[in-house]
Image: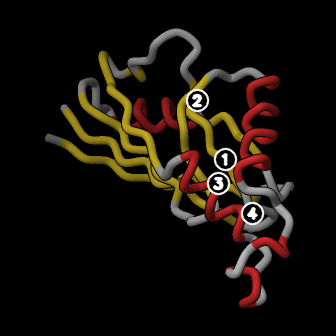
Amino acid sequence: MKSYTEHLLFDTSKRIEFINITDNVQELISKSGIKEGLVLVNAMHITASVYINDAESGLINDFQKWLKKLAPTDESLYQHNLTGEDNAYAHLWRTIMGREVTCAITKGQLDFGPWEQIYYAEFDGTRKKRVMVKIIGE
């Protein structure tokens, strides 16, 4: 079995940003030469998420509205922010949206159902961030 690891680097321009990284992940799969296996895509920051869903702008807006209802961005609500931080909501959002995804690779391609796309969701951005992509298989 072979293994290939590379990091995607982001310098987000907004504090909250959703980035479709499906093509980036597929490029790394092609670069790895692995035809059958799995790919792990992992946000390497505790205020960011990687998830799979539809690439539809209305849904992305719905996610943001839903997250703000579950854990509002109001700094005064959280003990974590008493330490001088202002991102407690971002830690909670990451817990809700998840840390990573694992996807099947078949014939050198992401083996997805209709409409599935991989997203990097940044909840405390405007600085450098990274995502680990680890590919294993034959």
| Residue under the point 58% across and 14% down | 115
- CA gap between label 3 and label 1 equals 10 Å
Say if 131 sits above or below 41 in the image: below
Q: Which residue is mark 2?
A: 23
Residue type at mark 3?
Answer: Trp
**Other-residue count near label 1 (Cα within 10 Å), few / some / many at <14 / 14–19 / ≥20:** many
Residue 121: mark? 1
Residue 102 occupies quadrant: top left
Question: Would you place residue 56 above or below residue 94 in this image?
Answer: above
Residues under numbered marks 1 and 4 in contact, where contact means CB atoms less than 8 Å apart: no
Q: Nearer the viewer, residue 57 or 8?
A: 57
- Residue for badge 4: 124
Residue 38: name its quadrant.
Answer: top left
Q: Farthest residue to the left: give it.
A: 1
Task: Name the residue at 71% across, 49% down.
Answer: 70
Mark 4 residue type: Asp
Residue 31 appears left or right of 69: left
Q: Nearer the viewer, mark 4 or mark 3?
A: 3
Q: In the rendered view of the protein, which quadrant contains the C terminus?
A: top left
Indicate the position of residue 15 as horizontal and vertical percent values. Answer: 82, 59
C-alpha distance separating marks 2 and 1: 15 Å
What label sits on residue 52 in the rendered view? none
Mark 3, residue position: 93
- Position of residue 110 measured from the top left corner of the image (x, y, whole percent): 42, 23
